[in-house]
Structures are given as C-alpha cells and as structure tokens.
C-alpha cells in the first residue's frame, strides 16, 4: 500500500506546531497501514495515541486563542471514540474493520479535517493576530516515536 505523502498544498496550515503534529499523524498512519498482521494492533495503538495528542494540542491552542468551536472538538471526540472501539477489537485479534479504517478512511478524513476545520482555526489565528511562537509542539505520548522531526528520539519514558 502506498504511503500517504505530506503535501504542503493539502496539509500545511502555516502553524508550526499543528503542521508538526499533522506530519506525526501521517507518519503513524503510514506505519499502521504498512504493519504486519502481528504488529497492527500496536501500530494502531500508536496512531490513536499520536492522534489523541494532536487533538489535545489543537484544542489547547483553540482555548488559548479564544476560539470556541464545538463542532471541531466534537469531531475530535467522534474520531477518537471510533478509534477506541476499533483498537479494542484489534487487540482481540479482530482487526479487519480497523485495517479498513486505516487503509481507506483515516487518510481521507484527515485531508478533509485539515482543509475544513483546521483551516478555519488557521484563519481565526490569522484574523486575530495570534502567534504560536510560545506554543511549541508537545512531545508525543510516552513510548511513541517522535515524528515531528525526522530522526528524533522517541517521546518521554520510551
């Protein structure tokens, strides 16, 4: 299966910490898409953790800049809920639906999410003059690979 490639036109928002998070989500998604049967549940667990950390970072930024976007936060909760359900199944050896989600839905969802809800966040930041210079991308969850910078070590506690 071909990897999802970072594309500045499709994925870049010009918000360094969010763009770094999106790169990390894409890398974890590619890892899950390419995982062997035996490694899939762990790769999907990492994808869920990286996605959750990104959503937390994004929502913290939304709070900091005064953007109250319940639709955006609700979409985060919906996707995390779906991922949690699929992860529970995959950890029990029933990964077929989770594999289909990773192979067919997650990448398309991420593109749409970035181009709509995340782009609205970027536009709000531009309109209000809010800067993210003091809002660095946070480290990935414990043990998850740090994909914000190629070759970076794993997150804390790894």
Image (cartoon, helix red, strand yellow):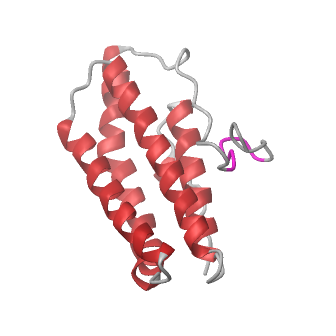
Q: In the figure, residue 118 lies in which quadrant?
A: top left
In this rendering, position of residue 45 left or right of residue 52? right
* Quadrant showing the N terminus: bottom right
> In this rendering, does residue 4 appear at all?
no
Residue sitting at 69 percent across and 40 percent down? Answer: 155
Residue sitting at 55 percent across and 71 percent down? Answer: 41
Q: From the top left corner, tell me how far across and down residue 137 is, in percent.
A: 57, 31
Residue sitting at 47 percent across and 53 percent down? Answer: 10
Q: Which residues are magenta?
A: 145-150
Residue 6 versus residue 57 in the image, above or below:
below
Q: From the top left corner, tell me how far across and down residue 142 is, in percent.
A: 63, 43
* Quadrant showing the C terminus: top right
In this rendering, position of residue 85 left or right of residue 135? left
> In this rendering, does residue 114 appear at all?
yes
Question: What secondary structure is the stretch in magenta mostly built from?
Answer: loop
Q: How many marks?
A: 0
The answer to which of 33 and 121 lies nearer the viewer is 33
In this rendering, position of residue 61 left or right of residue 120? right
Q: From the top left corner, tell me how far across and down residue 156 is, in percent.
A: 69, 36
Residue 133 versus residue 79 in the image, above or below:
above
Q: From the top left corner, tell me how far across and down residue 34 is, in percent.
A: 64, 76
């Amino acid at each position: 299966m071909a990897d999802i490639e970072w594309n500045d036109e499709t994925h870049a928002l010009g918000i360094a910490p969010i763009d770094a998070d999106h790169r990390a989500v894409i890398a974890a998604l590619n890892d899950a898409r390419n995982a062997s049967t035996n490694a899939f549940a762990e790769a999907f667990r990492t994808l869920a953790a990286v996605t959750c950390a990104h959503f937390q970072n994004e929502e913290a930024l939304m709070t900091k800049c005064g953007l109250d976007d319940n639709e955006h936060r609700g979409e985060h909760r919906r996707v995390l809920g779906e991922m949690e359900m699929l992860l529970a199944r995959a950890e029990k050896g029933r990964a077929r639906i989770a594999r289909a989600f990773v192979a067919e839905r997650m990448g398309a969802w991420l593109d749409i999410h970035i181009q709509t809800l995340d782009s609205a966040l970027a536009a709000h930041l531009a309109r209000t003059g809010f800067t993210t210079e003091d809002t660095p991308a946070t480290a990935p969850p414990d043990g998850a690979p740090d994909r914000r910078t190629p070759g970076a070590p794993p997150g804390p506690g790894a």
